Amino acid sequence: MAEGEKALLERLDSFDAGTRRQALRDILGMVESGGISIPPVKAESNLHYHTFFSFNANGWSPSRIAWESLKYGLEISGIVDFDVLDGMDEFLDVGELLGLKTTVGLETRVFINELSDKVISSPNEPGVAYFMASGCYRHPKPGSRAEQILLSMRNTARDRNLAMVERINAYLNPITLSYDADVTPLTPAGNATERHLLLAYDLKAKSVLGGDAAKVAAFWAVKLGITPDEASALIADTPKFHDKMRAKLMKYGGVGYIAPESGSFPAIEDAVRMIHGMGAIPTATWLDGTNPGEEDAMAYLELLISKGVRAANIIPDRNWNIKDPEQKAIKTRKLKEFIEACRHFNMPVIAGTEMNKAGLPFVDNFSAPELAPYADDFMTGARCIYGHTALARYASFGYLSEESMAAFGEDWKARNSFFAKAGAALQTEASIAQIMKEK
């Protein structure tokens, strides 16, 4: 990578939006002058990148993700952040500037009353499931119920973080955090996640202990219940170190764990109402089918469809790229069951890698034998979500809009075919006008 391009990429991750915008213009100048080449578009997609507005392991902004997607040759790129739409406008605008097809999602957790006694996709938390809005393109109307629910998600997450920090500070003393001084500066809009807390505690220990590697290892050895040698080895591998910290400090049974209470997460009905209020698509997020709430894919999706869910999201890398042969066999079988259930219900299914942890691939390997049978499902789903996004923005014809319901009714197969065709063809407002004539 040329030195000039490297410096531009660093500016592309600045917390200042103006700096990011100018860096993008400068990069495009290098493209136009021939200094940077752009490859042909590949039939590949990733609709689940987290940005630095929640947590990206590389610290990438929406603009950086869009640029890296273009330079890779992705056909469609999508971001998903926890509890916020802070990166939405930037990502959609930059997509237009780059000529890249972009989508936006929002991820949260919801409570499903019918499964209150079953673990679903949030470990050790019965009734709690990860959940998404796909195809976001507008903010909730000011003063609307949708806006209130979205704001409550952000506030609830912050309150939970504050409570965790208080408990963890007591355990790690004298390594203690000030939430406002040590945590919120790690993210541009103050929307901190557990991964920001892990990074903050990691940095604080090194700072307080003067960067002395032996002292740092000794401290974490005591607090994590391991030997100093084990601590030294872990600290050298940041992803594994943070996973160990997270298990000991934040997850179920950890010193800072906050058990869900009534109202900790919105009811799925409220989340669906909010998503409809934004013109987006309520989307199931599937873990791996091994927990009681997910093990019967047909029954699970049937329940979610009755709540208004019409699409599904998978992080496939964790369902096939597994060393243990027995676990791999189980999870690849459950993956097949889930994809077949999505096909049965005519639900678009999208996929992606989160990049909220170091070492995750930039794009799923759809050519791997375990994923190849579903590559068309993932690309069709991605095109469907992009088709919805483009038509909703420019023709008021979103996937679940009144106009779409009037045109397709309950014929989900025909609706999917139309929006996938639109997503494959659309790139300009002129092409949008042509597609609308064909609906």
Image (cartoon, rainbow, N blue to C red):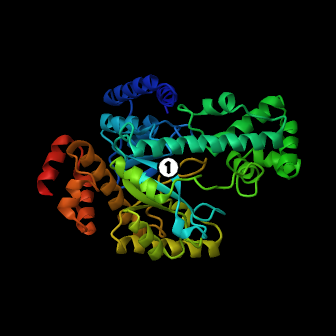
- The residue depicted at 65 percent of the width and 29 percent of the height is 180
The residue carrying pointer 1 sits among few (fewer than 14), some (14 to 19) or many (20 or more) residues within 10 Å by Cα, namely some
Q: Which residue is mark 1?
A: 362
The residue under the point 60% across, 48% down is 357
**Which picture quadrant has residue 138?**
top left
- x and y percentages locating residue 45 in the rendered image: 39, 53
Q: Seen in the image, is 246 located left or right of residue 65?
A: right
Q: Is residue 202 above or below residue 128?
A: above
Q: State the quadrant of the C terminus.
A: bottom left
Q: Is residue 426 visible?
A: yes
Q: Would you place residue 80 above or below residue 416 in this image?
A: above
Amino acid, disc 1: Phe
- Is 258 placed above or below 372 here? above
Residue nearest the observer in this picture, 376 or 282: 282
Relative image position of residue 315 (x, y in whole percent): 50, 59
Residue 134 visible in the picture? no
Using residue 341 as the reference point, say whether residue 115 is left or right of it.
Answer: right
Q: Nearer the viewer, residue 46 or 208?
A: 208
For residue 350, side relative to residue 247 (left or right): left
Secondary structure under the numbered disc 1 in the rendered image: loop
Q: Residue at x 45, y 54 (%)?
A: 270
User: Residue 31's image quarter?
Assistant: top left
Q: Position of residue 425 (x, y in %)?
A: 22, 52
